[in-house]
Amino acid sequence: MTAPCDPGIIAAWGSFGENSGPLPEFTHETGCTTLAYAFHALALMAFPGKLRHGDTARRKPALTGVLRILVIEDDPDTAAYIASGLTAAGHRVETATTGDDGLRRLAQSSYDVIVVDRMLPGIDGLGVVKAMRAAADHTAVLFLTALGGLDDRVAGLDAGGDDYLAKPFAFAELAARVAALGRRNQVNLAATVLRLGDLEINLLTRTARRAGRLIDLLPREFQILEYLARNAGQLVTRTMLLEHVWEFHFDPQTTLVETHMSRLRAKVDKDFDYPLIHTVRGAGYSLHAPD
């Protein structure tokens, strides 16, 4: 049964406005306590512009064979053993000893794979993964735990885990499973994320970041930026934007495109090291980074 939530937590969640969605429910033994532990980190992941004001840059996951891995494990010897082995395999590894610490790291950085124990101090492994999924964080998760029964494995996968390995384990198998999850995650990222210079456009969450900073875009502005990114380095004419963004097959004889482009440029280029949106005089626009 889900424990009732403290009114203060409900009010805090609602303070994000109508875009915050319904209050997530965590239907395991810790009930709303899990939400209380996870709330700050979960809110950072779900609404980074609301809380961070863009001053903490989230690093991008790797798109090479080198993976960024977060190991959430409360046993120091086990954590050191895993981190040492994965580092020796060429990956970049960070560790957290509690679920709360793990969520804070997830709110501040991006990873390719998460290795998490089920039994953690405070918020447990199930709570960590449920908080991630409630915040639309789809990073690959491998549960590594002594709870290896059938019901335990099912509970882990139902919570949002991608794989499950019981302790004791062979390191070679752990490394192989992590590598497989990393490959899968990279394929998904390549299909759903557009990148140009320090600009990153996530097609699933419909968000854009530059130098790690969230750009607050209106839906139409996002459509324009997405179209420019899909045609990066090429000339995009005013007529092309009218047809593909507004679905107008005629010229409305207004400054509609120019007005939106001016606003978009102010958001995407202002206060950054170099401009990405360029006007091709008398022809249209082009999105490209310096060589």
Image (tube, grey):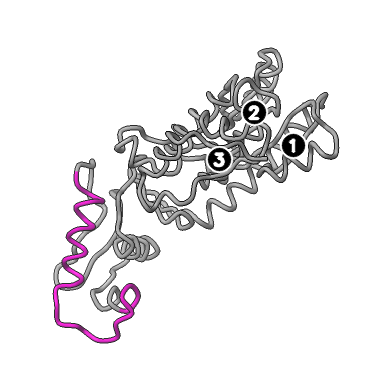
Disc 2 residue crowd, few under 14, some 14–19, many 20+, Cα 10 Å: some
Q: Is residue 171 left or right of residue 30?
A: right
Q: Give x and y (percent) for residue 39.
A: 48, 34
Say which of marks 3 and 1 sits in front.
3
The span picked out in magenta is 243-270
Q: Considering the numbered disc 1 on the image, is that residue within a helix, a strand or a loop?
A: helix
* Mark 3 or 1, nearer chain start: 3
- Residue nearer the viewer, 147 or 270: 147
Q: Considering the numbered disc 3 on the image, is that residue within a helix, a strand or a loop?
A: helix
What kind of residue is marked 2? Asp
Residue 197 visible in the shown view? no
Measured along the vertical axis of the image, is residue 135 above or below residue 120?
A: below
Quarter the N terminus occupies: top right
In this view, the residue farthest toward the bottom is 250
Q: Give x and y (percent) for residue 256.
A: 18, 72
- 259 in the magenta segment: yes
Please give the residue where the numbered disc 3 appears in the rendered image: 132
Please give the residue where the numbered disc 1 appears in the rendered image: 176
Q: Residue at x 85, y 39 (%)?
A: 150
Residue 32 quadrant: top right
In this view, the residue farthest toward the right is 149
Q: Give x and y (percent) for residue 127.
A: 62, 34
Q: Tell me the tag on residue 124.
A: 2
* Mark 1 or 2, nearer chain start: 2
Q: CA distance from mark 1 to mark 2?
A: 25 Å
